[in-house]
Amino acid sequence: MPSSLLFVGGCTRQRLFATHANAKGIAAFRIDEETGASEALGITEGVDNPTFLAPTADGKLLCATSEVGGWNEGTITALAIDKATGALTYINKQPTRGDSAAHLSYSPDRKFVAVANYSTLPMTARPNKSVVVYRVATDGELSPLTSEVAHSGATGPNPSRQERPHPHCVHWTADGRFVLVTDLGLDRVFIYAFDASAGTLSRHGEVALPPGSGPRHIAFHPTLPFVYVANELLSTVASFGFDAAAGTLKLLGTALAVPPAAVGKSWGAAIKIAPGGRYLFTGNRGEDTIAGLAIDPATGLTSLVSTTPSGGNYPRDFDFSPSGKLLAVANHNSDRVDLFGYDASTGTLTAKAVIETGTPTAVGWVKV
């Protein structure tokens, strides 16, 4: 029976977006990808509020961000993965040069990792950096940062959520030449050129979204020249044409990810392209659903085709398993991760199993 490892991060300290903090650290599970059956492998403690985590593609390293209220700087912690047991071994950690570290991603060659700091402290609170980059050694150790940038500019019209810049997601392009960053507070996607020899970012361009969108997370189509952004505040998905050679984005259009009556009562979360590239999925917190949108391969535009109950309350993060047969959904206010079977031919999700775990906010799969 094929199995994979699933790592789950969660709140060990209470945050504004979570009603409680029942996580003990980073939990590891062995998952049967045919049945969804799970085996608890243990919990790695000692990482404060690992609210986002990501394993590397080779499954040897996992990094987690610590998002702790009141800290002027979050941290990023590197841990080595034992694929046989699911155990995590501490390597080192670095400060993120800004508060509320919210997201991380690796360069395609795994030689660098970047962190986006959502930032909730006043703009005058130092160090107030938006995005930072670290070099990653072959053994997974994180160097002191190689680059940092700070966002500024005119904020969006939502006074309670767009009072300042709020970087929420950072992703490298497939060729490693550019880094894209969503900023929920500024209604912008920023594009940075990346110098791999020096490990530095330089501003390359930006693209605006409709006012009040609140761009949260990014997904690159695996085979087509399109990029998709989940907009948290308007519960929409924005479609962009992407010129990989020039490093430019062009807004093509937006589509609702919830029924019209739910706008303003639900907030977008993670976004993922499903295996096969025909559909994308995004989470809706409030309506508590996973929305499925069909992708038009000719235009890149999307259309809402389904909403599936997430199985719990506030689906903050989700991801497809290595085989593509399962979708793991972190319902953080319900202390559970729900596993859904995925049918790539129809784009449908079917509830399969439940994993009880404290305040889950992030999931990451490793193929074994």
Image (cartoon, rainbow, N blue to C red):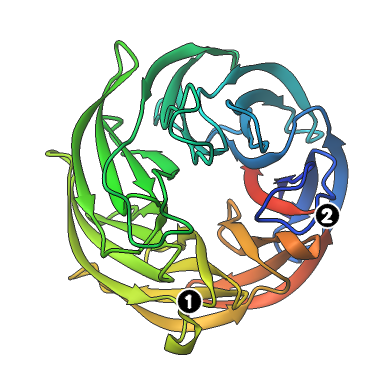
* Residue pictured at 46% horizontal, 28% vertical: 128
Report whether 60 appears left or right of 138.
Answer: right
Q: Which residue type does callout 1 highlight?
A: Gly
Q: Which residue type does callout 2 highlight?
A: Thr
Question: Label 1 neighbourhood size at 10 Å, few (<14), some (14-19), many (20+)?
Answer: few
From the image, state whether disc 1 or disc 2 is nearer to you: 1
Q: Quick one: which residue is furthest to the left in this view? A: 246
Residue 283 lies, in percent from the top left, at 54, 67
Residue carrying label 1: 264
- Taking depth in this image into account, of 185 and 261 the one nearest to the observer is 185
Residue 42 lies, in percent from the top left, at 87, 39
Dividing the picture into quadrants, the one containing residue 336 is: bottom right
* Residue pictured at 31% horizontal, 54% vertical: 187
Q: Quick one: which residue is furthest to the bottom in this view? A: 261
Q: Which mark is residue 160?
A: none
Position of residue 239 relative to residue 365, above or below, is: below
Position of residue 239 relative to residue 247, above or below, is: below
Report whether 260 appears left or right of 317.
Answer: left
Dividing the picture into quadrants, the one containing residue 287 is: bottom right
- Taking depth in this image into account, of 121 and 55 the one nearest to the observer is 121
Q: Which mark is residue 357?
A: 2
Position of residue 211 relative to residue 134, above or below, is: below
Determine if residue 300 is in view.
yes
Mark 1 or 2 closer to N-term?
Answer: 1
Location of the N terminus by quadrant is bottom right
Location of the C terminus by quadrant is top right
* Residue pictured at 49% horizontal, 22% vertical: 126
